Amino acid sequence: AQSVTQLDSHVSVSEGTPVLLRCNYSSSYSPSLFWYVQHPNKGLQLLLKYTSAATLVKGINGFEAEFKKSETSFHLTKPSAHMSDAAEYFCVVRLFQAGTALIFGKGTTLSVSS
Amino acid sequence: GAVVSQHPSWVICKSGTSVKIECRSLDFQATTMFWYRQFPKQSLMLMATSNEGSKATYEQGVEKDKFLINHASLTLSTLTVTSAHPEDSSFYICSAWDRGYEQYFGPGTRLTVT
């Protein structure tokens, strides 16, 4: 069965320092993986997605993630945090082929201090 | 990008009454829509998969007689919470598939049952 594990429930960084949000996946297939962000009282926004093309995926707002099959990981990174990055981040795996449901990790709360 | 709307964005109802939540794909046709539920400070849990013109597929543990889903057209799916109780209070989020790789999420509906 497909699943994702977000290794940190809460990450705190200072503005201008790097961000690392960790995600491991479990999949019987070649997975499709996503990172979504949810700001308080706002809807989900897709940051980036991996669908078996390049293993290093660049997303919006300076975020990127690298798919590492040997480590079954899909960690999200950003070189320099901004205050506006404070939000809830979800690592997501798609259940099967395109058009099937998404399975969400438990989420990581990112706090950014000045 | 594709837009998914939900109505209402926030609803308060009394225990024992029913509430209908609408999910619309505004600029694309969605043969498949998904309904998720998110409790405070928790992740999204898939409730059901809705295909246009057919019965919804519910996840294990989700009562299909309590959460009625109708997907009568390619742009509209509705979720009706019947005989609502305080434990049904939650954030309900829909998503729609545009036949590509991506699902588009609605902004969510916050249901409070008093």
Image (cartoon, rainbow, N blue to C red):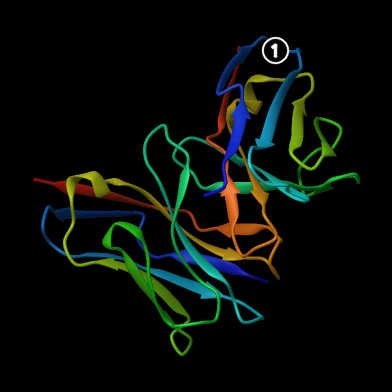
Looking at the image, the residue that sits furthest to the front is B27
The number of numbered discs placed on residues in the rendered structure image is 1
- The residue located at (61%, 21%) in the rendering is B8
Residue that mark 1 sits on: B15
A23, above or below A41, in the image: below
Percent across and percent down for residue A50 are: 50, 73
Residue found at x 37% / y 64%: A59
Q: Quadrant of residue A56?
A: bottom left
The front one of B60 and A114 is A114
Q: Which residue lies at the image location 75% right of the left edge and 31% below the top edge? A: B79
Amino acid marked by disc 1: Ser
The extreme right residue here reads B54
Residue B65 at x, y percent in the picture: 86, 32
**Would you place residue B38 above or below residue B113 in this image?**
below
Q: Mark 1: few, some, or many residues within 10 Å (few <14, many ≥20)?
A: some
Q: Dot 1 lies on which element?
A: loop
